[in-house]
Amino acid sequence: MDTFPITFLPDNTVIEAEAGETLQEVADRGKIHINASCGGEGVCGRCVVELRAGTVLASPGLYLSEEDFDKGIRLACRAKIDGPATIFIPIDSRADASFFKKAAQAEEELTVENPDPMVRQTCLILDPPCQDDNRSDLDRVNASLAELELFDNDIDLSAMRRMPTALRESEFKVTVSIFYELPLQKPEVPPYGRIVSFDTSTSDDNFYGLAVDVGTTSVWIRLVNLATGKVMPSVGDLNGQISYGEDVISRIVFAGKKDGLKRLQNRVIDTINRLLERYESTYPGYRKKTFIMVAAGNTTMAHLLVGLDPKNIRLSPYVPPASTWPSIRASFLGINVEPHTVMKVFPSVSSYVGGDIVSGVLASGLFKRPELTLFIDVGTNGEIVIGNQDWMTCAACSAGPAFEGGGVRCGMRAAPGAIESFLYEKETKKHYLGVIGGVSPSGVCGSGLINVVAELFRAGVLNKQGKYVEGSAPFLRQGEDGWEYVLSPAENNSVDHDVVLTEIDIENLIRAKGAMYSGYQTLLESVGLEMGDLERVIIAGGFGRSLNIENAITIGLLPYLPVEKFSYIGNSSLTGATLASLSGTMWRTAFEIKEKMTNFELSETPGYMDRYVASQFIPHTDAYLFGL
């Protein structure tokens, strides 16, 4: 098979490629990200690249005009290698991870008082063997643990192999690390201990755990000190799986391709390993003293993390292969930690209400407070929980990618260059933009989309149907897809085109917000309650960080309630995983939360589709619901 050098700019990375491979496949092998919302199926048009030199086999197709094609524009998933080539990846098609570094830098350090982790350390001072006492090393260790009333301990093979050397190097003064498996179904049964490590140090206040949030878009980890309860700042990065699709359905489809499941698992493991390296400069050698990892993610992400085929999640009757997970040796998955590091994965409720939501509810405290609370995690698959300390119901809403900039012509993630805030002066008919990073605009992110639509609706530029009112604003024009509003002209941008908001973009947003709002209504009415009965609304996830509550109410995404009832708690999935890594009690509570949550499949719940149709206006067909 002939091979050819393919140069990717601006990385200036050269990768040898075989004839017939697509540019997307070549970039993937080189771990170069090119946006591919559809997972390389050729139906999203987001993997735009520019052929700077050489040749590839391609045709214009559905998403490229003849003019763009003549300029060298290609879709990476449809362009096949035919010889040497130089490919430029424009900013629209690249991933910008600078946001993650800034977010981590802004985070404060915390300390959790009185940690009770699932891994504990005990210092043993043993009598060395002699002619009168020639018990085995393990018998000697177990006898000493029994004297401390630490009975019934098993031992990992890796720890057993380390034991003879550790005992003699330390002159039989060792620190034993014991992982305690909690009997979740029978809380009255004492934890079952398993020796996982021997350390020659007899005094050490630095042994660690790791909390991991495996999100569809991003992965975050946080190092915690199991002895002191100190919580270190988190670090995050884009989930490497986004090269195979930006939502869980695309990932499930890709997992069904040849080697797809393994490639997806490798990508998320690679992301975790990159993040682990970030802690080494501040805490050198910490991984040798890391004994537990607690991971939270939606149901699909959990399956991909452990390498379990998720295909049945999207097939009726939507039954995942697993909703709870055994204790896993993290190194077995390829994570760069010691063999003694145990991984625990949060349980899921259903195919689309995952461990990230269980973790979020744990972090929010919803499960132990009397107020009727609505918990929202907004994303491509928005999850909602309604309840209090006595009961909880939950559901997943197929919101689509609009809240993360997907399905929008000039949409992008919340990264430098994204239009985030928008102010429209009705009197002068001028508008003002706020752009993340203070740089030239490249597109508009999900929270920016909400702000633009809310402002234009209040100004009368948009009507209830989400259609532009002709002649109402100077920045309106007829575009290739109908009426559109020019947010920023090309000469002001870091991309070579106007940044616009089309009526099709607004339709996608209305569908997304309608899915969420009708979900709240359905859950509440299923238990005989109304929006006005809500006492608290908790918003979680990265999207909520920059969400303007009043604008979200204006378009009908959030219920019409006093602003003081709303609160934002950030990455609740990571926070819940942090609590569980530091506390066995919290880990056990997570399973109690899972068992307490009643899941509703909205598509099969009477009245949901009627409510969804009624929500397809700004803010709603029933103006009374929004005080109008």
Image (tube, rainbow, N blue to C red):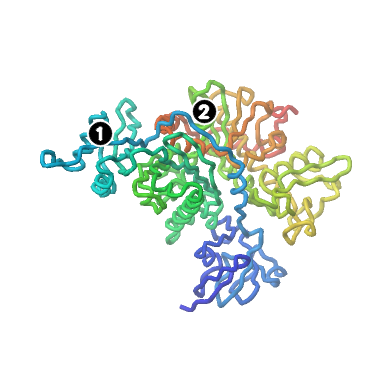
Is the residue 150 above or below the residue 22 in the image?
above
Name the residue that disc number 2 marks: 365
Q: Residue furthest left?
A: 132
Tell me, for residue 145, which label it has, or none: 1
Residue 612 relative to residue 499: left or right: left
Q: As drawn, which residue projects farthest toward the right?
A: 428
Task: Estimate the x, y position of residue 562 in percent, counting from the top left.
Answer: 69, 26
| Mark 1 neighbour class, 10 Å CA radius: few under 14, some 14 to 19, many 20 or more | some
Name the element at disc 1: helix
Q: Nearer the viewer, residue 87 or 627?
A: 87
Residue 527 on image: x %, y % = 53, 25
Residue situated in front as seen by the camera: 561 or 466: 561
Which residue of the protein is positioned furthest toward the top in this rendering? 370
- Residue type (three-letter) at the residue carrying disc 1: Leu
Tell me which label, 2 or 1, sits earlier in the chain: 1
Q: Mark 2 against mark 1, which lies toward the viewer?
A: 1
> In the figure, 80 relative to 267: above or below?
below
Is residue 308 at all visible to an observer of this figure?
A: no
The type of residue carrying mark 2 is Gly
